[in-house]
Amino acid sequence: MKKAIPLLIGFIIFQIGFSQEQPISLSLEEAIDYALEHNRTAINATRDIEAAEQQKWETTATGLPQISASLDYQNNLKQQVQVIPAEFFGGQPGEFSEIIFGTKQSMTGFATLNQKIFDGSYIVGLQSAKVFLEISKNAKVKTDLEIRKAVIEAYGNVLLAEESIKIFERNIEVLDKNLFETQKIYENGLGEEESVEQLQITLSGVKSNLNNVQRLKTLAYQMLNITLGLDIYNAIVLKDNLETLTDQNITLSMLESENNPESTIDYLIAKNDKTSKELLLKLEKSKALPTLNAFINGGYSAYADEFTFTKKSQDWFGSSVFGISLNIPIFSSGMRNASTQRAKINLEKAKTELTETEQRIKLEIASAKNDYQFAIEDYENKKQNLALAERIETKNQTKFFEGIGSSFELRQAQTQLYTAQQELLQAMLDVVNSKAALETVLNTPINN
């Protein structure tokens, strides 16, 4: 038994370690594909399509034969007494006899078949079900586009945090070295205390920024996990780096792409809304048409004073009915006309909104192209600025340690360099994000 306990503990530890979530390694494209399959919003959008398909069949089935059955059992605990003139049974005129009609218990079983023959609202309902399915599919495309954009932004924010941490750590390493050397110069009486203090201020600020970015990195990973549909604390390893992604996302040909609003998902959704309003108008008009339905039923009934309905000797009496029902709307005190006019107004509103959507999409495309072009130009500018800032910082560092430059000038050059580093990283992220925004507006197809 004593030997078994360590083995059991070892097995439990092994199981716990094995059951822990293993890190997922993803490139940006792999992350997009993963999110389109596992993102919770994407999953529900797929379910909406499935629900719309079921609703389409549900609407279709209302015009197909409907069969229902019923089984009724009655037990008259106290039967109603009727009185009739006694002379019917040979009694004296003016006297009455008390009688009870029927049996104490009865059972009836019926089956009914109903069938629509003509109903204008049913025809409109079939058309509406198809449009509703199309709306759900377009909503899924819209959802996938937004998820793709969200993944790119979340992925980029993680890379931005990772790169920022690397830069801050390198800057701290250089500053630590400079501070050590400056401290020694001061201790030997060859420098001023202010030079040491200036470097200490700079170092303190960089360390504070590093701590902040490290916290932001944790939040960025958690946001990416949520976007991917993972647990918030799941471990992820990113395959791509920010510089590579930036170079891959510089596609100048996109700036020459055709501005066709009618191919965008927002336009198609607005067009769906117009179509649905047209069908609602047809539905209101159809309410003025007659409806024709047919039915046939059949069943059996049995009667007894005792419960003998399960016995073979029980007599059952059959019956059957066939009928047609024609319902003709004649006068509704203007209610149908008001409903029809309201539907017409809503249709005109939908037409206006479709035109407004078309114009808005044209503006969004133009704006997204401008933002993308500016992001590319700004990225090239920030690269040049960083190269200049690095040269200026190097010169000022050399001048400072040679005793011909002040600590204030060195701190200015260092601050300018650190700003240029962060601006370049942000410019790289802007290129990636602005291209994703342009692709979303242009309704670039999603590769599922």
Image (tube, rainbow, N blue to C red):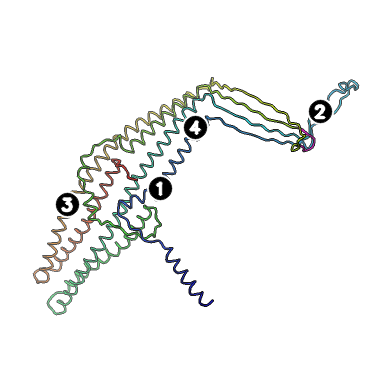
* The N terminus, quarter of image: bottom right
Q: The residue tagged with tag 3: helix, strand or loop?
A: helix
The first of marks 3 and 4 along the sequence is 4
Give the labeled residue for mark 4.
Answer: 60
Q: Do callouts 2 and 1 mark residues in contact (Cβ within 8 Å)?
A: no
Q: Do callouts 2 and 3 mark residues in contact (Cβ within 8 Å)?
A: no
> Which residue is located at x 27 percent, y 44 percent?
438
Q: Position of residue 152 (x, y in %)?
A: 30, 51
Give the labeled residue for mark 2.
Answer: 82
Q: Nearer the viewer, mark 2 or mark 1?
A: 1
**Residue 271 in which image quadrant:** top left
How far apart are the two marked residues, 2 and 3, measured between alpha carbons?
104 Å
Of 425 and 341, nearer the camera is 425
Give the labeled residue for mark 1.
Answer: 41
Q: Amino acid at mark 1?
A: Thr
Badge 2: residue crowd in 10 Å (few <14, some 14–19, many ≥20): few
The first of marks 4 and 2 along the sequence is 4
Range of magenta residues = 303-308
How far apart are the two marked residues, 1 and 3, measured between alpha carbons?
37 Å
